[in-house]
Amino acid sequence: MSRIAGLIAIAFTGLIAAGALDYGSFRRLAVVTAALFVAGDLVAALGIRNPAHRAESVAPQAMAQCRGRITAPPVGPLTR
């Protein structure tokens, strides 16, 4: 979102600055950019949701077969 806010501020620089770029227009540009950043943060805070994920339990036998193994488990049935 902050990239979009920066791009919008750059795109409207001439409109916000209202002519020559002096101290007053630079200050307006900085305030508008900051306001866009805050608006983007609010949209992200309200719009992005990460629902809780419940992990599935693994059978102890399956977990015991995978401990200490560097490579992937064999494809076929295990023989001991």
Image (cartoon, helix red, strand yellow):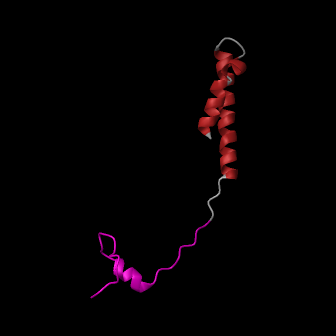
Quadrant occupied by the C terminus? bottom left
Q: Hey, which quadrant is residue 52 in on the image?
A: bottom right
Q: Is residue 9 left or right of residue 55?
A: right
Residue 78 in magenta? Answer: yes
Q: Is residue 17 above or below residue 76?
A: above
Give whichever of 55, 73 is nearer the camera.
73
Give whichever of 71, 19 is nearer the camera.
71
> What residue is rendered at 63% in x and 63% in y?
51
> What residue is rendered at 63% in x and 25% in y?
10
Q: Is residue 50 above or below residue 78?
A: above
> What residue is rendered at 63% in x and 36% in y?
4
Q: Position of residue 18 (x, y in %)?
A: 72, 15
Q: Is residue 59 left or right of residue 21?
A: left
Q: Position of residue 47 (x, y in %)?
A: 69, 51
Q: Position of residue 36 (x, y in %)?
A: 68, 35
Q: Position of residue 49 (x, y in %)?
A: 65, 57
For the view shown, which residue lies furthest in the left direction?
A: 80
For the view shown, which residue lies furthest in the top direction?
A: 20
Give the number of marks. 0
Is the stretch drawn in magenta largely helix, strand or loop?
Answer: loop
Q: Hey, which quadrant is residue 77 in on the image?
A: bottom left
Give whichever of 27, 47 is nearer the camera.
47
Quadrant occupied by the N terminus? top right
Q: Is residue 60 above or below residue 19?
A: below
User: Which segment did they paint magenta?
Assistant: 52-80
For the view shown, which residue lies furthest in the bottom direction?
A: 80
Q: Hey, which quadrant is residue 21 in on the image?
A: top right
Residue 22 in magenta? Answer: no
